[in-house]
Image: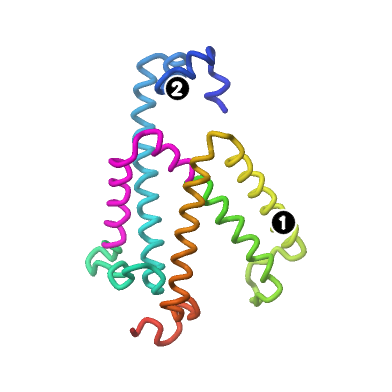
Amino acid sequence: MTLTVAIEDIPRITAEGSPVAAIMRDQLGPTAERILLVAISFAFFGAGIVAMVACSRLIFAMARDGRFPAHRLMRKVDPRTRTPIPATILIFALGVVLMVALPGAALLELITASTILPAITYGSTIVLYLAVRKRLGRRKGAFDLGRFELPVAICALVWTLVALCVLVAPEEALVSVVIAAGLLLGGGLAFLGLLKFNREAMETEPGDAGFFER
C-alpha cells in the first residue's frame, strides 16, 4: 500500500523492469535504494530458508507416516544433526531445477500459484472441520471458543473464499490457476494411489502400535 501511494508517474513505473526499486529511488534516492535492496535480499533469503525448512519437515512428516513416495528414504534423520537430510536435499534440488528451467514469467506464475494453493488448503480445512465438528471429542480444559465456534469458522471460510476470488479473478491469473489445478490433480492422483496400494497408511492413525514396525 505504501509503495502504491508513493508512485508519482504510474506509466513510467509500470514500464520499469523493477518497479519497486524505481519507486524507492524516486522517493529516497539511489543510496537508500541500494541499502533497502540489500535488506530485501536478506529478507528473501531468510524467507527461502524458512520455506525450504517447512517443506522438508512436511515431507518428513508424510514419509514418517508412510504417506509420501520413497518414504523409507525421506523419513531418515541424520543422527548427528537430527534433521531430515534426504527431504531437505529434495526440496533444495526441486527449487534449483525450477529456477534454472523456468523463464522469469513462468516462475512468476508458479509463485502466484503458490498463493492460491494455501487459500484452497485453508478453505478445505475449514469445510472439513464444519463437516465433522459435531463428532469431535472435547477435552476438559482445552481451548474452546464455545458458542462463538461456529460464527468464527463461518467468518474464516467467507474470508478465505473472498481471498481466493481475489486471487483467481484477474485474467492474468489464468496460468496460475491452471498450475494450481494441475498440482491439485497430481495430489489427488497420489492420494488415490495410496488408497489403492498402501491403504494401511491412510487408515492407520500415526503413532498406533506397530505402525512404524514395518
The image position of residue 73, as x and y in percent, is: 28, 69
Judging by the rendered image, the residue that carries numbered circle 2 is 19
Instruction: Tell me the amino acid under the disc marked 1.
Output: Ile
- Name the side, left or right, on which 192 lies relative to 120: left
Q: Residues within 10 Å of mark 1 (few under 14, many from 20)?
A: some
**Of 62 and 50, the residue lying toward us:** 62
- What is the count of numbered marks? 2
Q: Residue furthest right?
A: 147
Tell me if residue 98 comes above or below residue 79 in the rendering: above
Q: Is residue 142 left or right of residue 207?
A: right
Furthest toward the left, the residue is: 80
Label 1, label 2: how far apart the Cα atoms are: 38 Å
Magenta residues? 86-113
Q: Is residue 46 above or below residue 187?
A: above
- What is the x, y in percent for residue 92? 29, 51
Q: Position of residue 99 (x, y in %)?
A: 31, 41
Q: Quadrant of the C terminus?
A: bottom left
Residue visible at 45% across and 59% down in the picture: 186
Q: Main secondary structure of the magenta part?
A: helix
Q: Secondary structure at mark 1?
A: helix
Q: Position of residue 116 (x, y in %)?
A: 53, 47
| Residue carrying label 1 | 154
